[in-house]
Amino acid sequence: MPRKLTVTRIAAMRSRQLTSRGVELFRKAATADGADRSGLTHLTYAVMANYAVDAALTVALANTLFFAAASAESTGKVLLYLLITVAPFAVIAPFIGPLLDKIQHGRRIALAATSFGRSLLAIVMAFNFNSWVLYPCALGMMVLSKSFGVLKAALTPRVLPEQITLVKTNSRLTVFGLVAGGVAGGIAAAFAGVTNASGALIWTALCGVAGGVLCLRIPAWVESTEGEVPVQHSEVLTRGRVRRFPPGVSATLWANMANRIETGFLALFIAFVVKTEYSHLSGFQQLLVLGIVGAAAGLGGFVGNALGTQITLTRPDVIAAWGVVAVGVTCLVAIMIPGIAMAAVVGLVGSTSSSLAKVCLDSVIQDRLPEASRASAFGMSESLLQLAWVTGGVVGLLLGGVLHLSGDGVYMLGFAVVTLMVGLGVTQSWLSRSGRALVPALAAAWDRRANRRFAKSRSAGQTSAPRTARFTVPAAGDAEQGPRTQQLPTDEPPATSATRDRRPRKAGRPRR
């Protein structure tokens, strides 16, 4: 005799159906465009776990110096906070990046090691939360997180399906990561509410262990260099000189730095302005006002990454530059229409442009630099972007927290200064496309330094760097034969602007 249907049983059945449908939709999205056959799906899962660790750690440390300093309580704490955020990048650029460049065989293990290392540090922090041990461990967590990002960016071209571009792939990874971060952050908040910050840190450690296991499940062919064609010196020399980055990469990097200056400025400037201009409101009401700008910026970040997955960006460097132009125009309008509402619009446009420009930067580095220098390039770019964010934050701190202006004047002065800084960044971005600079003397000094490094590498016998070869994802009927590889001829013509963004795959993936 069938069981009687009750409201509870119907609700349970409906919940199971919705859960099954949600899981199926998630798997379909994660394996779309041949991602399951190229290995991108496994990398996506690992990236989601890394975002989960970041979100859980943020919740666990919400009341510590690392995040509470941005609440505009004192300029001294904020300056210390800015110094701490820059510290990990002083390690990544000169040490971690070049070290990761040398790891061509074993990057999956290195990727997993960053996740397992973060788990270990999270456990140490959980049992020493009120001790000075918390701070060096937190800095170590930040270094390992950025190292994961550098390794992930270097591995992405090796698991890229033929059907999609690098820009769309980077955006897809970010969108999946943001979703995972939101879920993991909510769970961490629940643990912190029921127990304390130690409970959230234990959850952080569990996410790190899961991430390490997922990293080891990335296909082994991402570490194969068989069949690669070496890059000739003519590809890195320009009129007998070598530059640190190709013009397209430099232009995109400058556009990203201009974006980071604006976002760093707004993050701290608006916090101090709300504290000053809305002093008659309670703390909770001030938080709600600040949340208007924060919500707009968060929405912009999601929109920027979503745009990267939906539109075809054949010229990422140009798209990034035009995005900064839009930010500059919005800041200019904010001078004429001062107020918290326009600040929210600036946050929306700036965050959208910053997110879209970041995926553009990742794609041009992955596409236009040899494999042997990508990790260093990502490490240096992350350091420069963080330095730009801190520069904007310091300007916002000085204008919003030190000058103590009132009324519309503080908005007008603040956005006038950031408009000028963004304008300089846009100008430098466009000049970089032709190898020029606003300050030619600095560019010449940079070239001389790069030439010395290049001469040293030639004397040591480092005359070539690996280059990727084309890879075609097999059709569904051929899946059992494994990925197919194709050797690039040595006289292959250079990629056109229409195909430059579609980075060829690595050769040497083993046949099954």
Image (cartoon, rainbow, N blue to C red):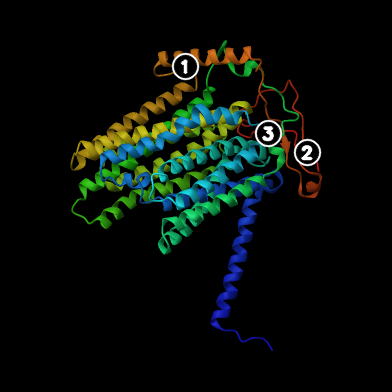
| 146 or 36, nearer to the observer | 146
- Amino acid type at image mark 3: His
* Nearer-N-terminus badge (3/1): 3
Q: Position of residue 305 (x, y in %)?
A: 50, 44
**In the visual, does 488 lie left or right of 165?**
right
Query: Taking 209 as reference, is 437 left or right?
Result: left
Q: Quadrant of residue 508?
A: top right
Query: Looking at numbered disc 1 in the image, what kind of residue is underneath it?
Result: Trp
Q: Which mark is residue 105?
A: 3
The quadrant of the rendering that contains the C terminus is: top right
Indicate which disc, 2 or 1, sits on the residue closer to the N terminus.
1
Callout in the foreground (3, 1): 3
Number of callouts:
3
Residue 270 in view, yes or no: yes
Q: In percent of the image, x 69 and y 35: which residue is there?
A: 223
Q: Earlier in the sequence, mark 3 or mark 2?
A: 3
Residue 446's disc is: 1
